[in-house]
Image: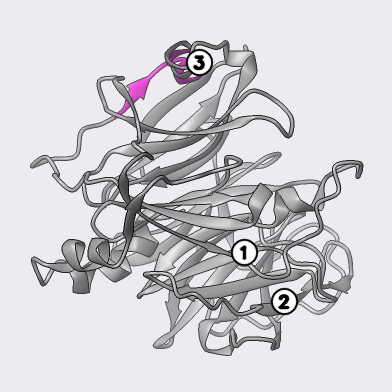
Amino acid sequence: MRRMFLTALALVGSLAGQSSAADLASQMTRGNAELQSAGPIAFAPEGILLAADPKSAAIVAIATGDVSRASTTAEYAIDKIDEKIAAALGSSAKEIQIVDMATNPSSGLVYVSVARGRGPEAKAVLLRVKPDGTLEEVATRNVPTASVKLPNPADDNPNARTNPRTESITDLAYVNGKVFIAGLSNEEFASNLRSVAFPFQPQVSTGSGIEIFHGAHGKVETRSPVRTFAAYNIDGKEHLLAAYTCTPLVTIPVAELQPGQKVRGTTVAELGNQNRPLDMVIYKKDGKDYILMANSARGLMKITTDKIATQESILAKVADTAGLAYEKIEAPTGVVQLDRLSDSLAVVLIQTKDGATNLKSIALP
């Protein structure tokens, strides 16, 4: 989980100078980027890929060198991308998992985080996808790289029904010089949001414990992790819009995310029970801002931000939906990942009824 908008905030400043990429890369060390597991991915300025490694509770940065953009953004229409990836890795579609997808705003190309194999021993692979279907493995050897380990991650318990460590990092994004990281910690307020200055500093804070009122469940929760989030400015103040399972949408002021603090988000929407948010982006259409969210059971939603600054927090049990209004987008169906491709286009991963995965670009609704 979600990224073109987030990185665009930082690129406004970085594009003003020609040396920004060199400055960032010069603070990274040439070496091998090591990943024990495949997780969410995002981009820092100038083609620097941020790859989460939930198993080791770490973020690894890689300077890809992919900073050349074509004059226009090419559209994507690649059927059975899962089979193409599997073939390139000498495997089968059943033996790989596309964990996340992100667009590199410096080049307009799509990247995917892939687990090769199943279970805890699956290998992490990072791939670049070109509009013509060409696949290139991201170099991880002898490249400018940096990494940071998160303190107090969720416990590693392979015998649990769901190993908590797999949710130590559920989403990440680069915003205005910092990498924001959502996931579970081993603390009392397990739901955690951290901000880490980039290039990475040696000391990483324990982050902020997050609590929310979950309308569908009718109670305050502190252990449910953020599934996907995006940055958004509300009344001149930076916020994170965070979505949770079953499906509250919450605003969290960035200024309150101080180390060791307990922060309560404002639940501005309940989007339906028995549902999981998969990905989200923010975009502008006809002069207004909207959230486009992909969901496991309720498909694509176009959520208005018109009243987000004045929306009262939901503090009582909700039978169905409440708060910010949304429109259900009927097509495409089966979207499991999405990102901004341009001002007018999104790129989506679609799982078809026959089990294949397609990579397509669509008009932002």
Q: Which residue is mark 3?
A: 86
**Tag in front: 3 or 2:** 3
- The quadrant holding residue 216 is bottom right
Q: Is residue 76 above or below residue 241?
A: above
Q: Residue at x 85, y 60 (%)?
A: 319
Kind of element beneath mark 3: helix
Q: Residue at x 74, y 60 (%)?
A: 321
Viewer-closest of 124 and 298:
124
- Of mark 3 and mark 2, the one earlier in the sequence is 3
Which amino acid, by three-letter code, is at mark 2?
A: Ile
Which amino acid, by three-letter code, is at mark 3?
A: Ala
Q: Which residue is mark 1?
A: 182
Residue 278 in percent (x, y) is at 61, 46
Q: Give the magenta-colored segment's residue range.
A: 76-84
Residue 322 in percent (x, y) is at 72, 66
- Disc sitting over residue 210 in the figure: 2
Q: CA distance from mark 1 to mark 2?
A: 10 Å
